[in-house]
Amino acid sequence: MSENLRTYKNNQKKLLFYLLFLLISPVLTAQTYTLSGSITDKSNGESLFGASIFLKGTTIGVVTNEYGFYSLSAPSGEYTLVVSYMGYTEINKELSLTENQKIDFEIVELTAQLDEVIVMAEEPERTNLRKPEMSVSKVNIKTVKKMPVVLGEVDVIKSLQTLPGVTNNGEGSAGFNIRGGAADQNLVLLDEAIIYNTSHLLGYFSIFNADAIKDMKLYKGGIPARFGGRTSSVLNVRQKEGNTKKIALTGGIGVISGRLAAEGPVFADRGSFLIAGRSSYAHLFLNTEAGENSANFYDLNLKTNYKLNKNNKLFLSGYFGRDAFNFGSSFKSSYGNLSGNLRWNHIFNNKLFSNLSIIYSKYDYDIRVVSNQLDWVSSINNYNLKYDFKYYLNNQYKLDFGVSGIYYDFDPGQIRPTSETSAVNPLSLDQKRAFERAFYVGIEHKLTNRLTALYGLRYSFFSRLGGQALVNYANNQPVVYNDELEVYQNGTTIGETNYNNDETIESYGNLEPRLALAYQLNESSSVKAGYSRTAQYIHLLSNTVSISPLDVWAPSGKYIKPQLSNQFAFGYFKNFKDKIYSLEVETYYKTTENRMDFIDGSNIIGQNTIETEILNGESRAYGLEFLLRKNEGDFTGWFAYTLSKSEQRTQGRNAREPGINNGNWYNTPHDRTHDFSLTGAYKLNEKWSFGGNLIFQTGRPVTYPNEQYSYEGQSIANYSDRNSDRLTPYHRLDISATYRPNEKRNRQWKGEWVFGIYNVYNRKNAAAISFGQNIETGVNEATRTAVFGIIPSVTYNFKF
């Protein structure tokens, strides 16, 4: 018996050894080598993110990272290396791969015309179809510059709103909404720095100066593991690095603002710089005979870099922008963003790339009421340290991993008297501190020639730090339900707990897995599926439908829980007619836990105990997105359509509590059943080109009064269920024409005139509808407020 067992074990060992030999024999017999380097624009030295490098006749290929770096491995042999990027000439290079090699490429743009419209597919077919990226949108900045916009001001945010799944809350509203999510659920990054308010002039324009922007990428779902902190989306915007070849000037003069950008080489051609400024003169149009009303904004973009050696490069970038409002001599306000980032790029070897960043961000606002002699200031500051790595293990595996830590300092508000005679008492709301850290790993795994997977795992940890006193409530309930009055009201306070600076008030930790799969059906089509779980630890305290300067950010803690979201997505992607056309169809389902909901009659202005105004609820959103592009030819553009639903529910904590809206699901303010846009650009000849947008959206959900009753001579309105009504549908048509008088391409000065008409047929889209009673007749009235009618514009752009 023992002899048979010994023979069986020996046979097992032989079989195991044989299987192991089969697995490693290809590695032993075929020597592989690594090819690495960088891809840059030959005209200005800018690194190119997303350029494709592959070996012709094989499935071996890769795309460049954010800094233009690439690395691929292949068995020794003779190959044709192909380098391609949207809007650039393709390079084919014969290559003998017999050793590790480092090759840098400079590629040439297809046209040298000023801001020529070249709208290509986001990536070439070989990477777009196979790459396991779900719900990602990328718009060429040159396309953005050709889209008609209000008052001729180029706007990055408004261009994104022509894509499926992206909406806003109407004209004059700040922020944007992704797949039914709120504006505060979007992580907006400018050169890795967090931007808390993306608007100028209360939402009419965005803070992004198109002359300073290099590229932008919007993740609507399938968020990579390296990003965290928000539950809806990530908008990653990067500034230009600066022209390393020559001094260049770009600018323009429009109806409402002027701008100028300069860039060029510095440090004996070991680096480059960019400085771009923009300022409005809107106050010239707002002055009236009755007062000194004014509104204006300005911003400044800065960036420079220095190449220490072939493996090390430093970057320093910054942004400063501010808005100021004066309403007569009685009210003044200003708000703005400030950010800076010091980065170190290091190439360890031909497979390992790293980026170390030290980042600072600040958002603040200041309101001065002259008549009451008071000044109110509020701010949020954060300091961020992050270290990211990318490891190109081999042709089958590519790894991303890293760590990050963010320290938050919240100042929700200080009210200060501005004179000795002021009747206002000084008031400081409790300052709050928090620390968020995370580590992540992401693996792109090529399972077969047709199937590629992207695994991601992120662990985030959040601590609400001490240094303040917290109110304690009976039964630990900041909000209680009054059965007699049938309303929610403040809980009963039973004292305070003081926390020292070295103490932690509350801590949360969350595991955030990510998964995406891409299966290539054939050479022109593929299907993709994705899942992502995200956590959000800071919250925007606002009971308005869009971001405003008065909004206050607050951390999770003892009474406010972090938001947790799960999103599933499935999509079909196809290129046809030799990639002239492309089709993207996606469906998604998203749920969010612990979504804050404000009780009826809540008041958050100057509120030190915000927990007494909110309840924790849940939200869900689902929809179908359709995007058809025409990528090449004299006429280019896209048609986008979204069919979606976004709802929220906050149930009672026990059987006798009704919750909000009686615990029933109700439409979020960001719900749009139908949303479609048609965007096109047509090049007539070398002098004339044209553009247009046609946009339609289902009206925004609102709450209207449905009846009224009289009490002691007063007329009191009763309202319908929350967000059960809607504004009228939103739609408009915009057109533009671009004229280039200079046909000589070799001339240094190039200029163009851009003529535009916003809202061609003068549609009075409702921004709000208010209800009241006519004083003279006593008849109830509804008043619709519209922001814009038809607006013509003219802009002169130049490049030198």
Image: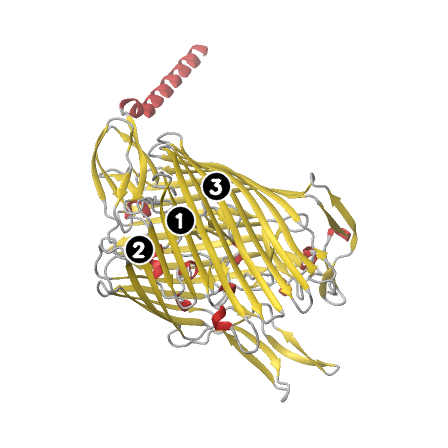
**Do callouts 2 and 1 mark residues in contact (Cβ within 8 Å)?**
no
State the residue in front, 18 or 754: 754
**Distance between the alpha carbons at the discs numbered 1 and 3:** 15 Å
The first of marks 3 and 2 along the sequence is 3
Left or right side of 534 for 571: left
**Could you say whether the residue bearing mark 1 is in a helix, strand or loop?**
strand
Estimate the x, y position of residue 123 in percent, counting from the top left. 31, 49
446 above or below 593? above
The first of marks 2 and 1 along the sequence is 1
The first of marks 1 and 3 along the sequence is 1
* Mark nearer the viewer, 3 or 2: 2
Say which amino acid is labelled 2: Phe
**Distance between the alpha carbons at the discs numbered 2 and 1:** 14 Å
Mark 3 neighbour density, 10 Å: few (under 14) some (14–19) many (20 or more): some
State the residue in front, 775 or 68: 68
**Could you say whether the residue bearing mark 2 is in a helix, strand or loop?**
loop
The residue that disc 2 covers is 800
Say which amino acid is labelled 1: Leu
| Residue under the point 31% across and 55% down | 800
The residue that disc 1 covers is 274
**Distance between the alpha carbons at the discs numbered 3 and 2:** 29 Å
**Could you say whether the residue bearing mark 3 is in a helix, strand or loop?**
strand
